Image (cartoon, grey):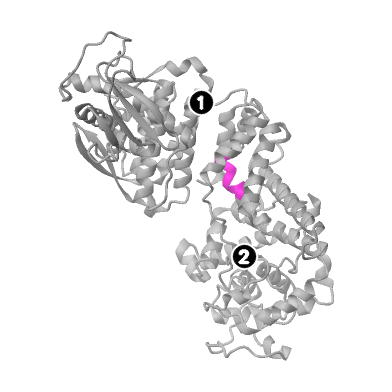
Amino acid sequence: MSDDLFEPYDDHEHTGREREKHGEHEGDGERHEDTDADTRTGPGNGADGTRERDVPGESGGGTDGPGDGTGPGDGPDRAAGPGHSARTPPPRASVEETGQPLPAPAPTPEPEPLMLEHRVLKSLLGAWALAACAPEETAAVEEHLGECGACADEALRLRDAVGLLQRPESLDLDPGLRTRVLETCLKRRPPRIPVPDWASAYDAETARLDALLQDFGDTEWHAPVRLRWYEADEATTRRTTVAGVIAHLLAVDGLVAAALGLPDPLGGLAPEQATPSARTEAFWRGAHCPPTRSVRAPWRAQTHDLVRTVSFTGSSAGRMPVSYGGYELPLHDAMLDRAFECWVHGEDIAEAVDYPYEPPTGRHLHGMVDLAARMLPAVLEARRQAGQEVSTERRLVAAGAPGRSLRLEIEGSGGGEWLIPLDSPAAKGSAEHEVAHIALDGSEFCRLAAGHVSPQEAAAGQVGDKAAIRDVLLAAASMSRI
Amino acid sequence: MTQRDVPPRWDRKMQQRLARGEAAALGELYDRFASLVHGLAHRVLGDEDAADTVTREVFAHVWEHPDTYDPQQEPLRTWIAVLTHGLAVERLRAVGTAALARGGAGSAEDLEHQVRHASVAARADYIVHAMPVPLRTALELAYFQRRDYQQTAADLGVTEDEARRRLRLGLQLLATAHDTEAPGAPPGIGGAA
């Protein structure tokens, strides 16, 4: 790595003089807020426009511009060189002394001389280098630099360092990069303890949501979010904030954590009835103040713990039941369900703060649609028992026998076809007994199942038994919850 | 979430988990360091695709050779930053050399200049990233928000003396990006302030 070291070299005088010419237009060490900032930027920091502000002392003769990597302070021998005094930041009058064209008249009058002791002047060097001093102080510092070699050396070094300040690179990493990087790694060295396939959607979706949260300031964390779902076939909403949504995800993911023997994030707040909504409300109520950005770390830690723990439980554990209060899901379906919720709420959050948010990858979307399609027959049955189903005709079908079916055709990435048995969860979907066919886009179907579009408005191509179609669409929407 | 406050225990456990071949650990490693790695690589290479490639190489290296990291020596973050820096500079030089061989514009000297410059810029980024938060905040206020040091002091609720101290110390740390004493190592952490 020694070859990338920065060493003193000799061609800097040339670049230094080139840059002087730019510098001449800038007058002295006053702040410049004007638009000619661009002309000041050196080869190193101008290209990306990150250099925002003028630095004092650039106008004088022989000073290297910051950012071009040729500044003083990069080699002990430089200080002793013949150019030493020339590289000292000049006092304010130096432009005139160079005999070069004068800058436009300075807008501010010459400040009254200020007498400051050495200790104070030295302490001002950082602020001076950043052009963050009062004009009198700037003048006093620059006066002092002509007399004090130690301070002049440090001033140069610090002023050069200012040129290295750059706005951080955008933190918006392509979310797809994570998948690509991990795939490359795992191909080169197959893992001894892989993340189970059924947990990969959760792993990816939580990472995607976390990346979205990365740059959020307080404004975003407290942005209002309207959660939407269907209850008793009615669209229902609940207002919360971005932080409240993350608290909700933390509380409901906690069901899976509990099933795996991990600590419950609700602790003593956990309600008797462990439904997702009861847990969420208990968590929101129990907190002393509304959720803030501080909820991110525990949420993310729990998502990591879940992925890690399910990796160790082995493939047989995928069947382990996870209680959702009123019902259970096998662990692998619960992880898919949580991935689905994470995406849906990620979209809620993105919408609230006006950020773009893509649907999951086709492979993961397919798993989520498949989960919903597999759950539909049981949901239909529950609705039937509750008297919510209107479909007139119902036949008794022996368990495992083919029954009346609806063909669910999902288009787009992650799509496929599912035959939904309509008569009983025990019946087998059958192409021969197909009575209806609906076709819709994968993410549209997921929005329906999330309660984000109404069954009436879902953009679905429909053929066949209207009542059956209505039942299935309503059933899909009824799967949604807070 | 500042990464500096993570105890070294995390580094040790992470290394053990990687060595064990735990894919979930690799995911966590990525989640913690991807923006650092990609940011540094991008600062050196100035190109999104090239930064993606270096990011892939860095994580592949860590995953394939977790034992080459010694938690006693340095924080995992530093080790990964040094690794990234090295791979990115190597790539910049390789691409530049190939372009020269094809008869591209510029000289070998220009290329070395470019490599050195990119190297210093990346080191500076890392130093800013790793410096104590109070120093970084003061620099950001004074430079990006254009606050003078009195305003900076008021914004931070510290004395003007302290604001001046932070600005000076922050720049002193940053200036070490030019230093050659520690070959390739991003200085500025491990008690530098």
Picture quadrant where residue A468 is located: top left
**What is the chief secondary structure element of the magenta stretch?**
helix
- Label 2: element kind: helix
Q: Is residue A67 magenta?
A: no
Residue A459 to residue A156: above or below: above
The residue where tag 2 is placed is: B168
Q: CA distance from mark 1 to mark 2?
A: 52 Å
Residue B5 position in % (x across, y down): 55, 43
Residue type at mark 2 is Arg
Q: Residue at x 56, y 57 (%)?
A: A168
**Chain for disc number 1:** A
Q: Quadrant of the C terminus of chain A?
A: top left
Residue B120 spot, x, y in % from top left: 70, 59
Asked if one can make out residue A211 in the rendered structure from this viewpoint, the answer is: yes
The span picked out in magenta is B30-38
Task: Give whichever of B75, B69 is nearer the camera.
Answer: B69
Element under disc 1: helix
Q: Residues within 10 Å of mark 2 (few under 14, many from 20)?
A: many
- Which of the 4 image quadrants contains residue B176? bottom right
> Residue A213, percent across and down?
44, 46
Chain under disc 2:
B
**Would you name the residue on which mark 1 appears?**
A197
| Residue sitting at x 27%, y 18% | A404
Image quadrant in which you'd find residue A273: top left
Q: Nearer the viewer, residue A294 or A410?
A: A410
- In the visual, does A367 lie left or right of B20? left
Select label 1 or label 2 by which is in front: 1
Position of B149 with respect to B190 (left or right) is: left
Q: Residue at x 76, y 54 (%)?
A: B93
Q: Tell which of A179 and A423 is nearer to you.
A: A423
